[in-house]
């Protein structure tokens, strides 16, 4: 049974068991009906349509199996959520400043006005594509984060979202972040998998940046080898708002990354940094867009990726300046480094300019590792694999140094090293 064929009775039973409000139940039913009529998202040079990308399991509360390794994740100003269950939370310092941090079912019960106003209404829409509709119909876990007006958080919030693949089940997860006027905070999101079962993940993150807010959003994603993922991260920026995206794509399975920043307000600003490493036989397709609607808006994309073994990596970088976005600026750079003749890489720049009196530019490249650098390092006595990692770290360093948080830089460096060592085992 596919998700499209799923019985509405499953949705009604789930909503009743979890005391979901009537308006949210209606959205689920609407999504279920719309899904078969909507197209799949289309991305240049990313062919994923035959993957097991659709949600096929019945809508039920996820199973959660204890895993001792998660105990190491418990820190201050941190939330650890396994499937739909929060297994650790220490956010008192943040909530004392009026910040709302709660799981999805609690958010529906205690903060329905925020969900109803912003869930799939601004940054992305239910009817935008088939995977979005499936997401709404089958959603089981997530987090709401709301930072009130004029609140500036000096300490970052860290989250760990754990896909439980110790049993066969879909992972359908939603994060809604709302930064109210003049607020400022840093957020570090971790996606990881425990278990080895075959699974499909459908994850949507919406970030609403209200006027003059500033969000530093960092992520380190390492979903499992047997997980096929649609990962949709969207930003909606109002006047003079800014989002710094720092995204580390360290996944082991096939994934489509659908990233977009809508620069709706005048003077809004998005900086997007993406680092990706592909290993084994995996395919990572990353479609990164910045859309300038507001005057004097700025959107910059910087993407660097590395390919090992028989893997594939595709970067799409899309800058779109909408008519009326006077004095807008859209810049992008996408570069791919290949360490294997058996891998496949692509860096695909796209500029769509619908107005004059704007600034736009792009750079893209795909190339192999510099043999002279390798020869120099090995002639100094370094083993080949260590020499490769040094060259790769230098290649990715130009992105890392642009990340505004030193703590995130260090954390990403550690994840990069781990991913590279794992990817070199059979190389």
Image: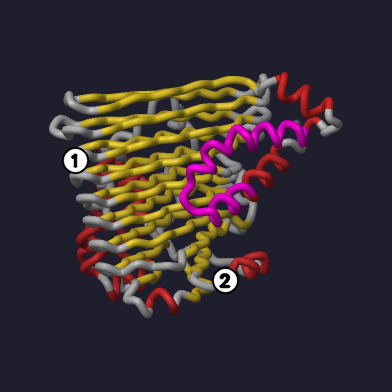
Q: Nearer the viewer, residue 49 or 215?
A: 215
Tell me what residue is drawn at x 25 percent, y 68 percent.
Answer: 149
Determine which of the numbered discs, if any, sits on residue 5 in the image.
none
Q: For residue 71, what is the image quadrant?
A: bottom right
The spot of residue 21 in percent (x, y) is: 24, 69
Instruction: Confirm whether residue 126 shows in the render.
Output: no
Residue 202 shown left or right of residue 264 in the figure: right
Which one is in front in this view, the residue at disc 1 or the one at disc 2?
Answer: 1
State the image quarter where residue 298 is shown: top left
Mark 2 lies on residue = 75
Question: Would you call the spot at circle 1 few (<14 residues within 10 Å), some (14-19), or many (20 or more)?
Answer: many
Q: Label 1 to label 2, Cα distance in Å? A: 39 Å
User: Which SS class for mark 1?
Assistant: loop
- Tell me, yes or no, if residue 109 can be seen here: yes
> Height in image: 330 above or below 244?
above
18 lies above or below 183: below
Instruction: Please tell me whether residue 27 belongs to the stretch shown in magenta.
Output: no
What residue does disc 1 label? Answer: 294
Residue 3, x across and y down, in percent: 38, 47
The residue closer to the viewer here, 398 or 140, is 398
**Total numbered labels placed on residues in the image:** 2
Span of residues in magenta? 385-413
* Residue drawn at point x = 46 percent, y = 50 percent: 404
At a point 53% along the width and 50% down the height, the residue shown is 220
Using the image, determine if residue 374 lies above or below residue 186: above
Q: Secondary structure at mark 2?
A: loop
Considering every residue shown, the one lying at the far left of the view is 324
300 relative to 307 in the view: left or right: left
387 drawn magenta: yes
Q: Earlier in the sequence, mark 1 or mark 2?
A: 2
């Amino acid at each position: 049974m596919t998700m499209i064929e799923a019985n509405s009775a499953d949705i009604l039973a789930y909503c009743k068991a979890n005391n979901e409000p009537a308006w949210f139940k209606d959205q689920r039913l609407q999504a279920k009906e719309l899904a078969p009529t909507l197209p799949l998202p289309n991305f240049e040079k990313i062919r994923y349509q035959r993957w097991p990308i659709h949600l096929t399991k019945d809508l039920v509360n996820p199973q959660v199996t204890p895993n001792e390794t998660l105990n190491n994740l418990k820190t201050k100003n941190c939330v650890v959520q396994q499937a739909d269950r929060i297994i650790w939370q220490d956010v008192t310092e943040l909530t004392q400043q009026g910040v709302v941090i709660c799981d999805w079912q609690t958010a529906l019960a205690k903060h329905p006005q925020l969900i109803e106003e912003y869930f799939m209404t601004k940054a992305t829409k239910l009817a935008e594509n088939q995977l979005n509709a499936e997401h709404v119909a089958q959603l089981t876990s997530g987090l709401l984060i709301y930072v009130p007006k004029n609140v500036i958080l000096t300490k970052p919030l860290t989250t760990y979202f754990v896909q439980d693949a110790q049993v066969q089940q879909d992972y359908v997860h939603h994060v809604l972040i709302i930064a109210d006027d003049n607020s400022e905070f840093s957020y570090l999101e971790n996606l990881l998998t425990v278990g080895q079962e075959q699974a499909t993940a459908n994850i949507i993150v919406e970030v609403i940046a209200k006027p003059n807010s500033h969000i530093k959003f960092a992520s380190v994603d390492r979903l499992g080898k047997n997980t096929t993922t649609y990962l949709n991260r969207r930003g909606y920026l109002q006047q003079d708002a800014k989002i710094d995206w720092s995204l580390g794509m360290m996944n082991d399975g096939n994934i489509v990354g659908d990233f977009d920043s809508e620069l709706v307000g005048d003077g809004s600003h998005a900086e997007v940094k993406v680092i990706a490493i592909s290993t084994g036989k995996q395919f990572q397709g990353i479609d990164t867009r910045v859309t300038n609607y507001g005057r004097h808006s700025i959107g910059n994309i910087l993407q660097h990726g590395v390919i090992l073994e028989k893997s594939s990596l595709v970067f799409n970088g899309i800058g779109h300046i909408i008519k009326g976005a006077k004095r807008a600026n859209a810049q992008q750079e996408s570069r791919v480094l290949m360490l294997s003749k058996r891998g496949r890489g692509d860096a695909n720049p796209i500029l769509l300019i619908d107005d004059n009196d704007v600034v736009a530019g792009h750079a893209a490249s795909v190339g192999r590792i510099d043999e002279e650098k390798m020869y120099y390092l090995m002639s100094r006595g370094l083993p080949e694999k260590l020499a490769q990692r040094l060259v790769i770290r230098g290649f990715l360093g130009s992105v890392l140094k642009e990340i505004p948080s030193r703590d995130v830089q260090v954390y990403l460096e550690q994840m990069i090293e781990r991913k590279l060592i794992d990817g070199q085992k059979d190389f």
